Amino acid sequence: MAVITVKELQALNLADDGKRISMGESMYGTVRVGKDGAVSLYVKWRYKAGGKLRQIPLGTWKDKGGQTLKALRDERDRLAVELKAGIDPIERKALERRGVVDAAQVAAAKAEADLAEAMHAQRARLAAIAEQAARLTVRGLFGQWKALELRQRADKGAEAERAFERDVFPLIGDVAAGDITKAHVQLVIDSMMTRDVVRMTKRVLSDLRQMFGFALDRDLVEADPTARIKKAKIGPDVERDRVLSEAELISFFAKLPAAGLADTSQCALLIQLSTLARIGEVLGARWEHVDFERQTWVLPTTKNGKAHAVKLNGFALRQFERLHKLTGSTAWCFPASRTDGPVCPKTVTKQVADRQRVASPMTGRSKQIDALTLAGGHWRPHDLRRTGATLMADLGALPDVIERCLNHTEESKIKRIYQRAKYEAPMKDAWRLLGERLELLSAKPANVLTLKVT
């Protein structure tokens, strides 16, 4: 933008009265013509401060008797230096009117104003954080709890996370943690109790209580919604002790091929029975961990957070060999349909339950509702693990050996620290005895007697 000259100002006349002209360098003037016909120019300077556009008077130009154009520009330059130093000329003039006159006082006043503004910004930031915390969902709270506290558990919180994914998150996972009430928690409990899983329900309630206690300690919630819910009211602990008798095992072996299960599902049940592994561990197995030459299967990650090595007996080895022909081209022993991961751990459990229904079949599920019904009543895949351990005991395996075959953690701290006995050989022998007995029972004998080793 061109800078105006003195000659251009002197050329202004009566016809320019009220006209607003640009003078360059962010200076603007308004033409005024007095009663005597004298022309003057009322000049202001525009500038930005704090992100806002402001303007301040510089003075009035007159050809005679007013401020010169140079004086107006000098005043503008002086104010520009003041602005660059962090002092808003308009605010400084306001302070002068209140009696603050020297530069030190101006600077102190500005510092005080800046501090007040900073404190306001800080309060706004803290309010935003508080609002965000208030909107923290149950799923988000679980993530914080897992990262800071659950990692100290032996399984790094994997079991708690599985339980929450199954029973908590579908119902209240997206609800703000601060909005959770006793009614929400009771909804989770009632939903679980429809499956008659008392122990699991109590465990989830305990974990919910610990999680909300964690949140309460950090002021993420104002109250613990689990506080008034008592475990005793959920029901008495009834430890499941279903063990298939040998007669039932003979029936199981006879019914399994005709039950309409996929060959892979049949292999999963038989591997679980002969190795004492958990069904989820079986279905999550990878071929890289199965060594046919050494006849071993290594479980790198288990419920107790420790690796576990299984010595495969002949019965279990044949199931893995049969399975390898079906899925050996993939990384997973039991791959999902896309082969990019293992099958859902609930798959086989659901299939077994579908084949023991007393009512009509569920829509889209197996029509063979009694294909796996046994004389002793309803059974689950996990009961096969307990059944295999019982067979080991009947065949003479020592309790400590069976516990290690089951990959249970020794409850006694003293034993864990000081008892350094090696159990590889007796474990291998226990698995061998179990495999031999399963071979006998699967051969459909007319009469079998259990012989205890002495």
Image (spheres, rainbow, N blue to C red):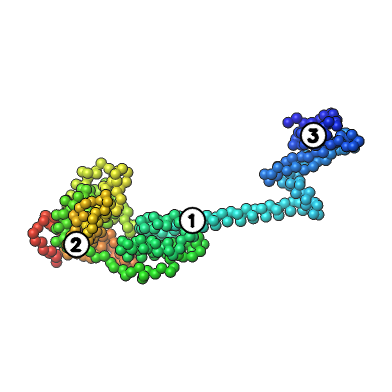
- The amino acid on which the numbered mark 3 sits, given as a three-letter code, is Lys
Name above or below for residue 310 compared with residue 12.
below
Q: Earlier in the sequence, mark 3 or mark 1?
A: 3
Q: Residue 344, image x and y in percent?
A: 30, 50
- What label does residue 244 carry, if any? 2
Dot 3: element: loop
Q: Are marks 1 and 2 in contact (CB under 8 Å)?
A: no
Whether pointer 3 and pointer 1 mark residues with C-beta atoms closer than 8 Å, the reply is no
Going 14% across and 54% down the picture, which residue do you hit?
A: 254
250 vs 448, nearest the viewer: 250
**Residue 151 x/y as whole percent:** 41, 58
Between the C-alphas of marks 3 and 1, the distance is 60 Å
Q: Which residue is pictured at 49% across the width and 65% down the height?
A: 223
Q: Residue furthest left?
A: 446
The residue indicated by pointer 1 is 136
Amino acid beneath label 2? Leu
Q: Quadrant of the N terminus?
A: top right
Mark 1 is surrounded, within 10 Å at the Cα level, by few (under 14), some (14 to 19) or many (20 or more) other residues, namely: many
Residue 261 position in % (x across, y down): 21, 50
Tell me the distance, in whole angstroms, between the alpha carbons under discs 2 and 3.
Answer: 105 Å
Q: Along the polypeptide, which appears first: circle 2 or circle 3?
A: 3
Mark nearer the viewer, 3 or 1: 3
Q: Residues within 10 Å of mark 3 (few under 14, many from 20)?
A: few
Coordinates of residue 62 in the picture (x, y in percent): 87, 36
Say if mark 2 contacts mark 3, CB within 8 Å: no
| Disc 1 to disc 2, C-alpha distance | 47 Å
Residue at left offset 24%, top offset 43%:
328
| Residue topped by disc 3 | 19
Using the image as rendered, state which of residue 97 and residue 107 is in the foreground: 97
Say what amino acid the circle numbered 1 marks: Leu
- Compare marks 1 and 2 and give the one earlier in the sequence: 1
Name the one closer to the observer, 26 or 22: 22
